[in-house]
Image (cartoon, rainbow, N blue to C red):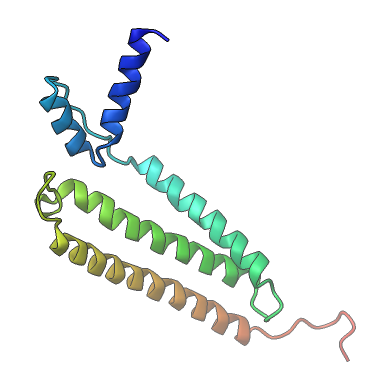
Amino acid sequence: MTIQWIQQTHSRGVLQCELTDVARNKRLGALGFTVRWARQRLTLNQITLVFGLAGVVMLTGLVIGTGQADGVGFSVLLARAVMIAANYSAAAACVVLAKERWKIAQFESGEVRPVCFYLRAGVMAVAIGQGISLGFNAVIAEHGRSAACTPPSQGHGSV
């Protein structure tokens, strides 16, 4: 064990005690450092990745969990899985993007948490989620109506 290893371990421990980036920056400032850094914002590719992974997880759960035993077609299951993934992605985007851009959402260590922001982001996520659900359910219902109006195929052993 070298003295450098001990110093690195100690400095990591000190910074790990702080929960937020703002608190870590303040702790570094109190120790005499002038390093300022911030987390990178989520890119469109990262948000798309979250949407895709949530879609895969939801689709797998719906297909394995419900299957087609209740008479629901695969296209409806797929649409529901995409709808759920879109709702989760929209809710995450409402919180993450708003927190980065709205001044009301940003607070310093030791300040009161922005409860108003939490409420506003929650209402915004619910409203957007309801809009997404309404759109998907309208498409699913229209698909069901058009499938019900299609006459059954003739031939193939029908009497």
Q: Is residue 149 above or below residue 96?
A: below
Spot occupied by residue 30 in the image (x, y as percentages of width and height): 11, 27
Task: Identify the residue at image location x=68%, y=71%.
Answer: 67
Task: Identify the residue at image location x=46%, y=60%.
Answer: 85
Spot occupied by residue 120 in the image (x, y as percentages of width and height): 18, 65
Task: Identify the residue at image location x=49%, y=62%.
Answer: 82
| Residue 149 placement, left or right of 14 | right
Spot occupied by residue 119 in the image (x, y as percentages of width and height): 20, 67
Q: Is residue 150 above or below residue 88?
A: below
Residue in the foreground of this view, choosing between 37 and 20 = 20
Quarter assignment of residue 24: top left
How many tags in the picture?
Answer: 0
Residue in the foreground of this view, choosing between 52 and 35 = 35
Task: Identify the residue at image location x=30%, y=70%.
Answer: 126
Quarter assignment of residue 144: bottom right
Spot occupied by residue 13 in the image (x, y as percentages of width and height): 31, 29
Residue in the foreground of this view, choosing between 60 and 134 = 60
Quadrant of the image for the N terminus? top left
Residue in the foreground of this view, choosing between 116 and 45 = 116
